[in-house]
Amino acid sequence: MKNFDKEQFNKKLKTQFIGKNLIHFERLNSTNDFACEIEKKSDSNNLKEDLNGAVIISEIQDQGHGRFNRNWLSPQGGLWFTIILITKIKEKDLTKMNLLAAISVAEILITKYRLKVTVKWPNDIYCNGCKLAGILSETEKINSLLYLNIGIGINVNIDSSVFANLNLKAISIMDLLGRKLKREILLAEILLSFEKNYNYFAETGDFKSIFNKMKDRIIY
């Protein structure tokens, strides 16, 4: 399977700052865990400015995990990535970030790919009753800086037999559309959607407007 093409991704990326620094790996235990590692090192080597908006992406995760440390299958063909933000959002509002990220992903899947997805509060995306994507946001406080790590996993070009063999109730975009997607384009679209929602929320504190865009598709 073809690896992620950074050059093609950079050509498609339209964000102001998120994803401009893309750090790509063939294999990691977890993109969220790696993000925490480099954040701890950044304080001593003046890399803090480079980390705001950085995206860690891996072709495979060996120890991908979701909420409550549940395992997340992360084989070749998916999008497994973490957005790093040095955030000024109030700590009491950080619980909304899972849902904000899920809404941002769902917006693209609905508007660009015509998929009838639902957001299962607060952090999963489903289609046809099967899990399509998941989000895990975690924070790391280092000295005066608060890092927000938004881990996102999306089943993109994965054959359904992989899930069936493990008795997982999951599905991929390839299954739903009957064709493979260019992951580079999908990631660029999602990062732009997320950046717009994140910037709006950071500037206004108005989460209700973001929630209302997807309120009819949120299930509990």
Image (spheres, helix red, strand yellow):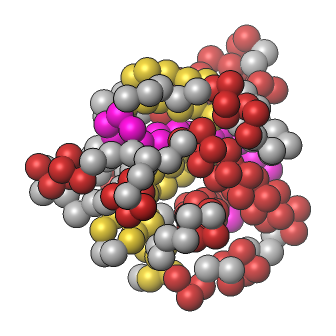
Q: Quadrant of the N terminus?
A: top left
Q: Which residue extends farthest bottom?
A: 216
Residue 148: image location, x then y, percent: 64, 45
Residue 117 is at least partly visible in this image: yes
Residue 115: image location, x then y, percent: 49, 70
**Highlighted range, magenta:** 74-93
Whether residue 120 is in magenta: the answer is: no
Q: What residue is rendered at 15% in x and 55% in y? A: 164
Q: What residue is rendered at 38% in x and 63% in y? A: 176
Residue 55 located left or right of residue 52: left
Q: What residue is rendered at 31% in x and 75% in y? A: 129
Q: How many marks?
A: 0
Q: Is residue 168 above or below residue 43?
A: below
Q: Nearer the viewer, residue 126 or 53?
A: 126
Q: Nearer the viewer, residue 32 or 40?
A: 32
Residue 10: image location, x then y, percent: 73, 31
Whether residue 91 is in magenta: the answer is: yes
Residue 117: image location, x then y, percent: 47, 73
Q: Nearer the viewer, residue 109 or 177?
A: 177
Q: What residue is rendered at 28% in x and 60% in y? A: 170
Q: Quadrant of the C terminus?
A: bottom left
Q: Is residue 148 above or below residue 143?
A: below
Q: Which residue extends farthest top?
A: 45
Task: Choose top left, top right, bottom left or bottom right for residue 209.
Answer: bottom right
Residue 143 is at least partly visible in this image: no
Task: Choose top left, top right, bottom left or bottom right for residue 48.
Answer: top right
Residue 120 located left or right of residue 91: left
Q: Which residue extends farthest front?
A: 179
